[in-house]
Image: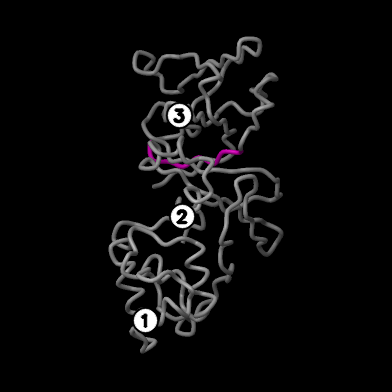
């Protein structure tokens, strides 16, 4: 299983409530008792929709540690950990809260580090500009992760790429539906020359709800203007264009690209 995919697929979403009710039936208790034991709100189970928050999942697992988290979220594997016989490494539960200014990390054997952070999928594009600073909104986003060798503090986001503007047919392409990992670039850095020799690709979150992955090929520091470039050779469809940084909400350096096959 690819470690960087914590998103729930459509089939699993449709069956999330059913699996929780199956577990409750296994416990030989009623739904209300389950909610009380786990300190969940009254009606929580019957109101489960497309996902379950990390905080709520943590409350359930703290009371029922033998419950297989992966089975609840995806339907894969066995319902109980005691039924699972595997040599796989147990990474433990993901942190229940994702702070806006930091990124949860899990130390792996051999010195590697797993960074876990929110993923802004295509379906979340429209609402992200309004909810990017709301902890509750960010907590509800699906998760993405990458393995790194050194831990660097900062805020990271995953973004699903929409369209083929960054697909030039080479191994450096960022094709449609791939996922990029961005490291947040604090606003005071925007007033200095961006390090375009080190990071050429950026995620640009604009105040008009637009999210774009582009190369920045020029930064006019005095006037606060960046020139954005698409690698797709079809320049009639993807010409270079300028963006005023006053119209930008967030900037992220692209540090990793995950291409889904």
- Left or right, 176 with respect to 38, comes to left
User: How many discs appear?
Assistant: 3
Q: Residue at x 62, y 50 (%)?
A: 103
Nearest the eye: 64 or 3: 64
Is there a contact, CB below 8 Å, between mark 3 and mark 1? no
Residue closest to the eye, 163 or 67: 67
**Above or below for 66 versus 144:** below
**Between disc 3 and disc 1, whose residue precedes?**
1
Side of 60 relative to 25 (left or right): right
Mark 1 to mark 2: distance in Å?
A: 27 Å
Instruction: Give me the disc on residue 150.
Output: none
* Residue range (magenta): 176-183
Q: Is 214 located above or below residue 184 in the figure?
A: above
Q: How crowded is mark 3: few (under 14 residues within 10 Å), some or many (20 or more)?
A: some
Mark 1 or 2, nearer chain start: 2
CA gap, disc 2 and disc 3: 22 Å
- Residue 25: give x, y in percent of width and height: 33, 84
Assign the magenta stretch its main secondary structure: strand
- In the rendered view, does 36 fall on the left or right side of 102? left
- Dot 2: few (<14), some (14–19), or many (≥20) neighbours within 10 Å? few
- Looking at the rendered structure, the secondary structure element under dot 1 is helix
Camera-nearest residue between 138 and 71: 138
Q: Is mark 2 on a helix, strand or loop?
A: loop
Residue 229, percent across and down?
Answer: 49, 19
Dot label at residue 24: 1
> Which residue is disc 3 drawn over?
212
Residue 5: which disc? Answer: 2
Q: Does residue 28 show up magenta in the picture?
A: no
| Sequence-first tag of 2 and 3 | 2
């Amino acid at each position: 299983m690819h470690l960087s995919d914590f998103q729930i697929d459509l089939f699993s979403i449709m069956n999330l409530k059913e699996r929780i009710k199956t577990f409750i039936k296994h416990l030989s208790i009623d739904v209300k008792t389950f909610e009380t034991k786990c300190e969940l709100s009254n009606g929580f189970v019957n109101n489960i929709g497309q996902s379950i928050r990390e905080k709520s999942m943590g409350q359930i697992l703290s009371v029922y540690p033998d419950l297989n988290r992966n089975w609840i979220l995806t339907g894969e594997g066995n319902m109980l950990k005691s039924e699972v016989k595997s040599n796989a490494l147990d990474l433990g539960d993901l942190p229940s809260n994702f702070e806006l200014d930091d990124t949860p990390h899990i130390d792996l054997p051999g010195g590697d580090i797993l960074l876990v952070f929110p993923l802004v999928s295509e379906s979340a594009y429209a609402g992200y500009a309004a909810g990017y600073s709301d902890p509750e909104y960010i907590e509800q986003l699906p998760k993405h992760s990458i393995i790194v060798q050194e831990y660097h503090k900062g805020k990271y986001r995953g973004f699903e790429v929409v369209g083929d503007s960054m697909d030039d047919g080479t191994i450096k392409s960022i094709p449609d539906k791939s996922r990029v990992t961005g490291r947040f670039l604090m606003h005071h850095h925007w007033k200095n020359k961006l390090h375009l020799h080190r990071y050429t690709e950026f995620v640009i979150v604009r105040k008009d709800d637009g999210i774009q992955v582009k190369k920045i090929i020029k930064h006019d520091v005095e006037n606060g203007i960046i020139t954005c470039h698409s690698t797709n050779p079809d320049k009639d469809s993807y010409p270079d264009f300028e963006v005023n940084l006053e119209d930008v909400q967030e900037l992220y350096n692209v540090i990793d690209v995950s291409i889904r096959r």
